[in-house]
Amino acid sequence: MAQAVSLPTSTPIANTQVRMADAAPGAHTAEAVLEACGLSVHYGTRQVLHEIELRIPRGTLTALIGPSGCGKSTLLRCFNRLHDVNPGVRVEGEIRINGYPVSAWDPVALRRRVGMVFQRPNPFPGRSVFENIALPLRVSGVRGKRALAQRVEQALQAAALWDEVKDRLHQPAQALSGGQQQRLCIARALALEPQVLLLDEPTSALDPVSTQRIESLLQELKSRCTLILVTHHLGQARRLAEHTVLLDAGRIVEQGPTEQLFEAPSDPRTAAYLSRAE
Ligand SMILES: Nc1ncnc2c1ncn2[C@@H]1O[C@H](COP(=O)(O)OP(=O)(O)OP(=O)(O)O)[C@@H](O)[C@H]1O
Ligand SMILES: [Mg+2]
């Protein structure tokens, strides 16, 4: 029996043009939270993604792998319409979340629901640890000192950072280590209670210990949201992802359960990529 999917209610959503809790035709026929249908992207006259068909199951982590320049970050940016800010980019086809096309959303509300973490930690410069999380919360309508403090603590707890920063909440975020800054960026995204978290090589600038901490964190986050992780580390994809998608030259070569894709790839190009990348 199909289940209605509702948004968390604790974050006010300004200007949302569609109500995600409503039933949408075809939305709940399967447990896909995120779908790309016939998705193509051009930068100017150059096409870099070709007719992508993708279904991301709810509450799982999907790894997006493939050679440098194959279009992983471009694909990720389609999910929260980051390309909108670049007039040279043309996106065709459709992305749906819970069955709703993202084109129907207010982009700001969409980006609250579909958070993003980048390769390099990017805390707001000149802002404290606390303000890095409180700022977007205020913008999204959270008011009152106590409520804010509570939400900031919850987010830092969820990102496994609270114990390390609870005594330095009002110090500059940029004084934290690289790994701590990245967990702060994850906390900042989590504070808005996203349904989907997009992670573009979030550990590639980090040392092994920080990487391990982020990996443990991602394992835990699967119970809170759906994760899409771009990574060049095949070991990381294998450790973390239920599903893996291999892109090459803007096309999906193969997608499926991670162990199956790694152990028994059905496309010879997958086997070739895995052996080259190991
Ligand atoms: N803003 C842009 N304008 C023009 N071309 C771009 C732009 N961004 C990316 N590209 C091109 O689109 C293609 C895909 O780039 P993308 O960044 O999505 O690859 P990627 O798979 O994320 O690579 P990497 O693993 O190196 O991060 C590349 O050829 C890249 O040069
Ligand atoms: Mg990239």
Image: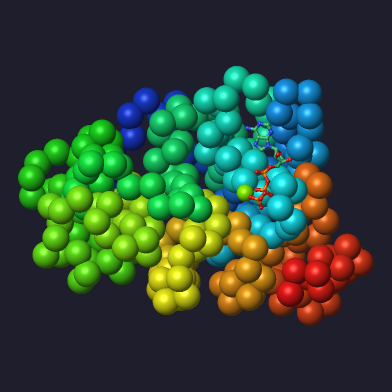
Q: Quadrant of the N terminus?
A: bottom right
Q: Nearer the viewer, residue 258 or 19?
A: 258
Q: Which x, y percent locates residue 76?
A: 60, 45
Tally of numbered discs = 0
Q: Quadrant of the C terminus?
A: bottom right
Q: Nearer the viewer, residue 17 or 156?
A: 156
At x 28%, y 41%, the residue is: 125
Q: Which x, y percent locates residue 242?
A: 62, 70
At x 27%, y 60%, the residue is: 176
In this picture, is 262 found above or below 78? below
At x 15%, y 47%, the residue is: 148
Colour pattern: rainbow
Q: Nearer the viewer, residue 193 or 159?
A: 159
In this picture, is 42 found above or below 67? above
- Asked if residue 183 lies left or right of residue 94, the reply is left
- Asked if residue 66 lies left or right of residue 270, the reply is left
Q: Which x, y percent locates residue 115?
A: 44, 46
At x 9%, y 41%, the residue is: 144
